[in-house]
Amino acid sequence: MKKIAFIFTVALGLLTVSCDSYMDINQDPNSPSEENMTTDILMPAAEMNFVSSYGDAMRIIGGYLSQHYAQVFGTSNYMEYSKFNVTATNTSTTYGQINSRALKNLTTVRQLAEKNGEWGSYLAAATMRAFIYQALVDAYGEIPYSEAFSGSTSPKYDDGADIYAGILAEIDDALGKVQAGDKVATNFLFPDKSAAEWIKFANAVKLKILMREYDVNPDAAAQVKAIVEEGNLPTADVAYKGCWKNESGAMSPFYAEEFSSSWGSTQINVVANLALINTMRQTNASGDVTYEDPRLAKFFEKNGSGAYTGGVSGTNFSTTNTYKAAYWCRPVASFDMPVYMITLSEIEFFISEYYARTGNAGEAKAHYEAAIEASCATAGVGDADKVIAQFPYEQSNWKKSIGISKWIALAGTNNFEAWCEARRLDYPAMGTVSGDAIYNEQTDAFKPTLYVPGTLYTPIKVEDKVGAGKIVERWFYPESSTSRNANSPEFPGFTVPVFWGK
């Protein structure tokens, strides 16, 4: 993976969109002098240090683990992810950047905002901290939280449930102090906006946290009910967009990593996985197309032969000519592609799930269909009714309905969240056909018709510590956190769920 060192460049070069005065500051926003330390300086630096990882490394790993992505022929950069293996070194740099730069700066923003009575900025920092800590808990299970930034060289690793409780309390504390008209520090997410949009986003983050822990937190149901009934949620996708430039160091992170040559590399790695392609485009026994998702063309390009095809997890195929460059379908990407924090589709799926859990089939169905319509709108396509007809809502198996449809919708917006939701909802479920049955590396026999749409499958040469028929439940603790920490816990194993999945 390229070392994308654009955080400072982006924070300075793009902030002119919302605050020209930021350009007057020559101090590195990751370590400003005390007299220059303001929420306006620190907030955008914190955002970019997180988004550069969330929109790139976390997206890529989530894409392989959720089987949205496969590895292109002839390269091996992400082959371990394709085999369901995430080592201690794989995410070490990512975690280090998120922790020491994004979270550290946000912690300072929160402290400064409280000291100065900047309650809009206080809420923004609390909401971003909650979003980031949830993502880290969902990836690793346990991380330092209560003793983070305390000065301890060996902060304890808190249980995920305790961290969830802590970040919910942080959001509630901030919501109790803020007014909709309060100003917010310079930021990329809602530039030139009052706290009103941050309040909606904070409610959406709360909804996501509570839905993820719904089965293990006895208080979640009542809190979700209150959020849904209040309805003060985003009315548009929440994303970092309109802030990217077609310049080195200023591009959207996934595009910069995988598509731009500005960093001196033209290597191609990420391509479509057969699981996603053959779910979004289905054929009958004769090979005739019976269904093609209208979003497919917005998610992936056609291959060199003008067709949609997908690779198999755990391999980049053989050295024959059969599956070389002309076979693969690349993700649709652009220098200004958004980095999505939460979409209207996700929010509607969560609300649908709430009603499904409470037995209100009518509302569950309505919000399920609204979620698919919102996903199509985000992709810029019509024909949502065709998608709904192909994947109709079933109250008797709502987890399957929501799980598969959300997995598809997130393929084009947030692959990390797709992996999280697949673990939580248990859909798409593991099928009975394995990757080595679909493709035989020794004989070069390829049988994509064996794949059952809407399922996952065991990768070829799957990581031994994961094994057949299982999904990766967590990432190995990052080396940047454990190497000098005497309180580092023993890694429980790739197949041990994080707290909300137990």
Image (spheres, rainbow, N blue to C red):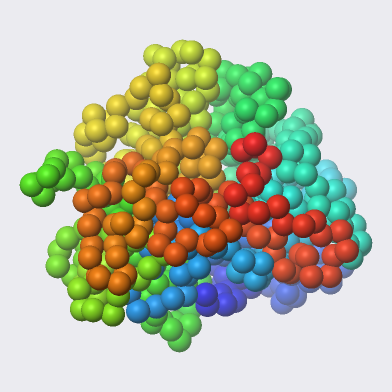
Position in image of residue 441 (x %, y %):
31, 70
Question: What residue lies at 39% left-to-right and 14% top-to-bottom?
Answer: 362
Question: What residue lies at 47% left-to-right and 20% top-to-bottom?
Answer: 356
Residue 246 horizontal side relative to residue 178, left or right: left
Residue 353 horizontal side relative to residue 487, left or right: left
Tell which of 352 and 73 is nearer to you.
Answer: 73
Q: Quadrant of residue 321?
A: bottom left
How many labels, in total?
0
Residue 430 horizontal side relative to residue 423, left or right: left
Position in image of residue 254 (x %, y %):
46, 65
Question: What residue lies at 73% left-to-right and 74% top-to-bottom?
Answer: 28
Tell which of 347 and 96 is nearer to you.
Answer: 96
Question: What residue lies at 14% left-to-right and 67% top-to-bottom?
Answer: 305
Quarter of the image that includes the C terminus: top right
Q: Is residue 365 above or below residue 106?
A: above
Position in image of residue 315 (x %, y %):
38, 68
The answer to whether any part of residue 45 appears in the image is no
Residue 167 horizontal side relative to residue 138, left or right: right
Furthest residue in direction front, as rendered: 442
Position in image of residue 111 (x %, y %):
84, 51
Tell which of 200 and 17 is nearer to you.
Answer: 200
The answer to whether any part of residue 129 appears in the image is yes
Q: Is residue 2 above or below residue 355?
A: below
Q: Quadrant of residue 114?
A: top right
